[in-house]
Each structure stands twice: as structure tokens, then as C-alpha cells.
Amino acid sequence: MNTEGIIWAVLFVLMLFICVTLHELGHALAAKRYHIQTKDITLLPIGGVARLEKMPEKPGQELIVALAGPAVNVVIALLLYMFLNLTRLSTDISVITHINAGNFLISLAIINLWLALFNLIPAFPMDGGRVLRALLSFRFSRVLATQIAARIAQWLAILFVFAGFFYNPFLIFIGLFVFLGATVETEQVQILSAIKDHIVEAITMKEVPTLNRKDTIEKAVELLLNSQAKNFLIMDGKKLFGTLGTDEIIKALKEHTKDTAVEVAANTDPPSIESDEPLENALLLLQRDKQSMLLVKKQGQLYGIIDHENILEYIMIINASAAKQQ
Ligand code: ZN
């Protein structure tokens, strides 16, 4: 490849990244219509991920949000095609061997169509998997719809891996990606449905060990090792100063000396939730912000805390008693 060829190739990859970003923006904009914010957009080798603060649960909304991404690529392809037609430039793709000035735009149009098609493969975590789940949700419960969609995704994944051995090793990679995505999706939906009608108050820990903000990190470590406690409230006299979780203690040990006061490691702006809110909200908040705990408030007053482990234990209990009843 000559220098000019390399420049066109680099430019093409760059444009491809822009198109993938626009695809993700499509999802983000559609989600915004339903008042769901997007945390960030990550570009991966096989596409992008728009991290929404939550997935829309209404099937119609999920359908629109899932389709919005591929729709962007279709629109880009159509616009490019129309432009090429209007300007009477070549749309002949049979002669493309490598990207150059003559076939740059038509190649970009084609790859956008491929992006749309690839993303519409009906397998989690591809957009097509969500489309499938949304369509199934019109008939079945969300959990059942997810289970059916995930099962289909897993069979497709096995097919991909199998085909990968004969055709293109890249398919093996996609197969594994789809398989993992389907598994994660099923687990998440099962968890959310298990706690559906439960509220935060049910598992709020009311007895939370406290530390004074001037206490040392060493004291926090001692409490951590000698008791069941994993989370602490850091007090300033009688007032709450902040919270301190295991992760923050470990981090503080790496960054400070043992006799440093815990106040430097405390989270002074901990997130909180009302005690009568659905437990689901607490779980989503913990997962989304990667928090070690949430403060639970009851009518504005501090009521206790709730953490991830707590919720998982509760789910195990719910599942165990549900299994017994069957
Ligand atoms: Zn997408």
C-alpha cells in the first residue's frame, strides 16, 4: 500500500468510529425521549456501548431505543447513496479492492449498512437481542421474554463459535461475547424481578457502627477485621460527616499511613434513598455509581444504610422461600 492508500485507510477507520459514535448517540437520544439519561459512551473494537442509567422496561420504549442505533447507520448509508447519485459519482462496489478517493463514500455507505445488520443480529447484547426481547415482551412477562431471547442468543453464540472454526476466527470472538452478554442479561432480569414488590425499608441495616472523623484508619481496619461490620458511618460529634466502606478503607491503606484520620478517606457526599422506595432503585443506584452503600432516609431523617451484599443475600432468601413454596 502506498502512502496515499494508508491515508485513505486511516481516514476510513476514523469515519467508521464517528459512525459508531453516531449510532450510540441514536440510542442515547431515543432514551432521552423517555427521560433516561446516558452516563457515557464507550467505543469497543466491535462497536460501541451507550451506558444508559437504566433500560426502559416498557416494550415499546425498549424497541424504539434499541432500533434507534441501527436506524442512524441506515440513514447515513442512504444519505451517502443519495449524495453519490446526485453528484453522479460512482456507486459501483464490484471494483473495490482497497479504499481510495474514488470509492471512499460508497465504501462508507456499505459499512454503515453492515453495522446496522450486524447490530440487528437477534442476540444479546446486540441491539437485535433487545428488539427481540421487546417484541416478546408484548406477549410474555419480561422475565420470560428475556429468558427466551437469551436462550436464542446462546444458541446463536454456539453457532457463531462453530462457524468461526471453519470460516472466520472473528466469529468465535463474537460468539463468546454474545454468550456472556446473554447470561448477564438473564441474571440481571431475574434479580430485578425477584425484588420487584419489595421496598428499601425491608432490609435497611439500622445498627451501623460509627467512627469519629478523627479516628485513625488503623482503628477502622481493626473494626473491619474483628467484627461483621463492613461499612461505617463517620461522625462529627453528633452530626453525620460521611460514610466509609471496605473499598475506601483498602484504598486509604494504599495511599495514606495507618495513623491518618478516617476523614480523608470518607465519602462526604454519600448517595441516599428514601426507605419507602422500591428496592430495585437501590440496586440500580449502587450498581450505576459503583457505591459501597447508600444512606437510607425516612421522612428526611437518617434511618440506616443498605449495601449490595445485603440485597444479594435478600434475593437468595426470597428465591429459597419461593422454591420451597412450589
Ligand atoms: Zn446499538
Image: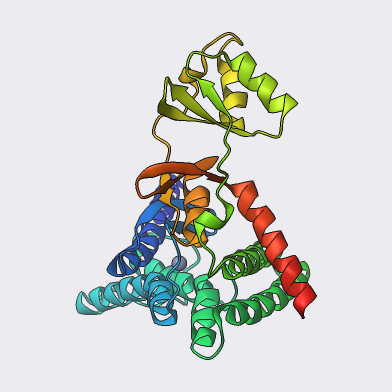
Q: Quadrant of residue 172?
A: bottom right
Residue 202: give x, y in percent of width and height. Answer: 56, 57
| As drawn, 241 above or below 166 | above
Q: Which residue is drawn at 68% across and 27% down?
A: 224
Q: Which residue is at the front of the view, 6 or 141? A: 141
User: Is 299 on the left or on the right of 159, as rendered?
Assistant: left
Q: Which residue is at the front of the view, 306 or 174? A: 306
For the C terminus, give its image quadrant: bottom right
The answer, for residue 99, to whether it is visible in the render is yes
Residue 191: give x, y in percent of width and height. Answer: 62, 64
User: Is 76 on the left or on the right of 295, as rendered?
Assistant: left
Task: Name, please, the residue furthest toward the left.
Answer: 86
Q: Which residue is at the front of the view, 59 or 127? A: 59
Q: Which residue is drawn at 59% across and 69% down?
A: 189
Residue 98: give x, y in percent of width and height. Answer: 48, 61
| As drawn, 131 above or below 41 | below
Task: Name, please, the residue furthest toward the bottom.
Answer: 139
User: In what quadrant does ligand 1 lie?
Assistant: bottom left
